[in-house]
Amino acid sequence: ELKVEQNPLFLSMQEGKNYTIYCNYSTTSDRLYWYRQDPGKSLESLFVLLSNGAVKQEGRLMASLDTKARLSTLHITAAVHDLSATYFCAVDRGFGNEKLTFGTGTRLTIIP
Amino acid sequence: GAVVSQHPSWVICKSGTSVKIECRSLDFQATTMFWYRQFPKQSLMLMATSNEGSKATYEQGVEKDKFLINHASLTLSTLTVTSAHPEDSSFYICSALATYAYNEQFFGPGTRLTVL
């Protein structure tokens, strides 16, 4: 059974600081996704990572994937208040199975 | 592109009634859609896969007779919660698989169901 774990579950950080969210998954997967969710809202797609060593950046967020370690990271650079949200990683079940298993989520709060 | 809508955005109903939620892909066709449920402060859990023209497939532990799914066209899937009870209160989110976009899932805005 595919399991996806994120840590930390909660993260409170000051504006301007850097931090990393980790996503571990237990079995082979074809793709890894990062999403953002604001309170009461649905998911906003951030990144899709397809291959080992993939790195994608958008603004202050950068995501990377290590398929050998089954680990993805979401790095936040010089955090700003607008980044406060819950972040989820999700992986598909591999071998062409697009069903997604979501991580536990990381609730990020940026403190001025 | 890749817009998915849901209707209604929120619904309140009495215990024992049935509620239908619609999921539409507005600018692309989707033979496959997915239904997720999210309880407060928790992650998303896949409930079922909706396949156009065929029966839905349900995840382990999801009652197919309680959560009826119909995917009647390439742009519409519906989820009917039958005989709803307070424990069915949740945020229901659908997604549509976009084959033109390397099979990425695009998510609807969600439907908040409250059963009194």
Image: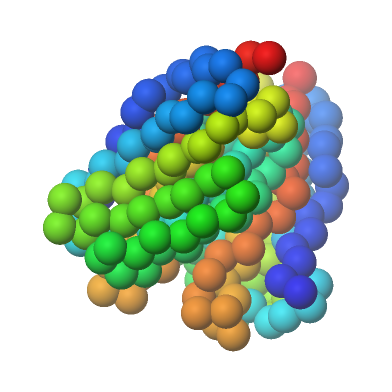
Instruction: Report the residue that reaches farthest toward the left.
Output: A68
Front in this rendered view, residue A45 or B5 = A45
Front in this rendered view, residue B105 or A73 = A73
Across and down, in percent, residue B72 comes to 69, 76
In what quadrant of the picture does the C terminus of chain B appear? top right
Residue A59 seen from this side:
yes
In the image, taking residue B82 as reference, residue A99 lies left or right, namely: left
Say above or below: B75 vs B65.
Answer: below
Q: Quadrant of residue B51?
A: bottom right
Say above or below: B110 vs A7.
Answer: below
Across and down, in percent, residue B29 comes to 69, 82
In the image, taking residue B92 as reference, residue A77 lies left or right, namely: left
Say above or below: A5 vs B24.
Answer: above
Residue B70 seen from this side:
no
Residue depicted at 45% across the width and 55% down the height: A33
| Figure colour scheme | rainbow
Residue depicted at 41% across the width and 67% down the height: A98
In what quadrant of the picture does the N terminus of chain B appear? bottom right
